Amino acid sequence: MGSDDISQTMKVISKKVLAEETLSKEEIIYLLQLEESPNRKALFDLANAVRCDTLGETIFIKGVIEFSNYCKRECAYCGIRASSKIRRYRMDPEEIVKVATDSARHGINTIILQSGEDPFYTTEIMSDIIKKIREATKKPISLSIGERTPEEFKLFKEVGASKCLLKQESVNPQIFKSVHGFDYETRISLLKILVLLGYVTGGGDIIGLPNQTLGDIADDIIFMRDIGIKMVGIGPFIPTKNTPLENHPIGSVDVTLNAYACTRLAIPSVLLPSTTALATIDPNLQYKGLDVGCNVIMVNFTPAECRQIYNIYDDKRNVEFYQTTRELLKRKKRLSPSILKALERKEVV
Ligand code: SF4
């Protein structure tokens, strides 16, 4: 590929990134719309170079425990929304702590506690779970449990949680309201509070929501950059049966990959997972994400009988620890020493 194959706009963008200058909304939209071309290859190469330069080559493995599929919300795309007629489960606090402690023995870099928005786990119960896991594992604990009050999030941080994911979903209030039905302003202000509380705060969105434009996706990336988001979860929309959006088309894989690369350029040090939603479309796509700026994979430690019914979207793929780490090593990806030690102990490499 010669430099003549690269557009003038792409050359300007590359120069700005290398000079650590801020990309404009128009430039991000230009990158989001790229199709297979030398320009797109240049975008991916640039994103990959920024990742390696900023954070090194290691792919971080986070372990997720989906401890409850009860949710009081009614997000239009979600398979575990309150009105879904599905089998429900809640893991006991002791079981959550045990599963988290077991997962830590695999050397994972972070333990993610994830659930629907489930008030069963009161402030006291949730604090106790976080405290016990932190004491037992010393691992960073990330929360993905929906909205709580600022006071609760403050307490959860004091007892041991250090990361928190609360996707903004869309900073376009019309899109947000049409798919969520809860308060947009509360969500945005909570995200800012999480940053102020000192959490490594995660945002993110879904590619392919109804009426979403590339401009909306660019606005999401700019919003996350500007409020100090440090983790970003972006996945393609996947339709789920018996939800209001069951007939809405699947989100674009190309735009998702472009959004990963743009996010890496906009927030160079971001923790950026190549998401399970991509793996659900095709496992190879999840590995492709690691070549376009992503540096995290989330593996699932939810007990098998619960995992099968944590269906936030249809046919959600089970990303399993040993299979994933084996595949990453086969693809010559670098893993952290704690993961390699755990693999050696199991002699799976
Ligand atoms: S997306 Fe989250 S908050 Fe919305 S219904 Fe699903 S689990 Fe609940």
Image (cartoon, rainbow, N blue to C red):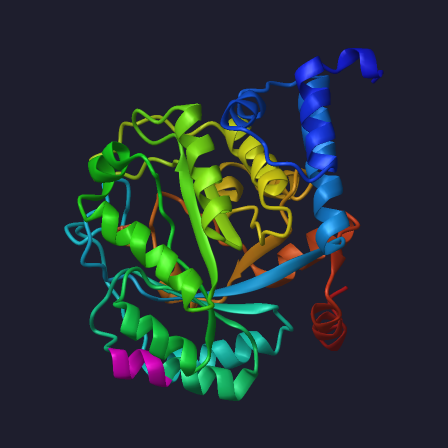
Residue 309 shows in this picture: no
Asked whether, in this view, residue 339 is left or right of residue 64, the answer is right
**In x, y percent, where is residue 71?**
22, 59
Residue situated in front as seen by the camera: 314 or 107? 107
| Residue 90 part of the magenta-drawn span | no
Asked whether, in this view, residue 1 is left or right of residue 298, the answer is right
Residue situated in front as seen by the camera: 180 or 190? 190
- Tell me where residue 32 sits by quadrant: top right
Residue 127 shows in this picture: yes
Asked whether, in this view, residue 186 is left or right of residue 236, the answer is left
Query: Considering the image in quadrants, where does the N terminus appear?
Result: top right
Query: Considering the image in quadrants, where does the C terminus appear?
Result: bottom right
Farthest residue to the left: give it. 83
Q: In this view, does 159 lie above or below 322?
A: below
Residue situated in front as seen by the camera: 200 or 195? 195
In magenta, the rendered stretch is 123-128
Residue situated in front as seen by the camera: 35 or 220? 220
Q: In this view, does 291 lie above or below 273?
A: above
- Tell me where residue 117 sits by quadrant: bottom left
Farthest residue to the right: give it. 2
Farthest residue to the top: give it. 4
User: Residue, x 57% and y 49% (percent of image)?
Assistant: 272
Prevalent SS, magenta region: helix
**In x, y percent, where is residue 97?**
43, 82
Q: Could you tell me how many numbered marks the image carries? A: 0
**In x, y percent, where is residue 328?**
71, 52
User: Residue, x 61% and y 78% (percent of image)?
Assistant: 105
**In x, y percent, where is residue 306?**
36, 65
User: Residue, x 60% and y 18% (percent of image)?
Assistant: 35
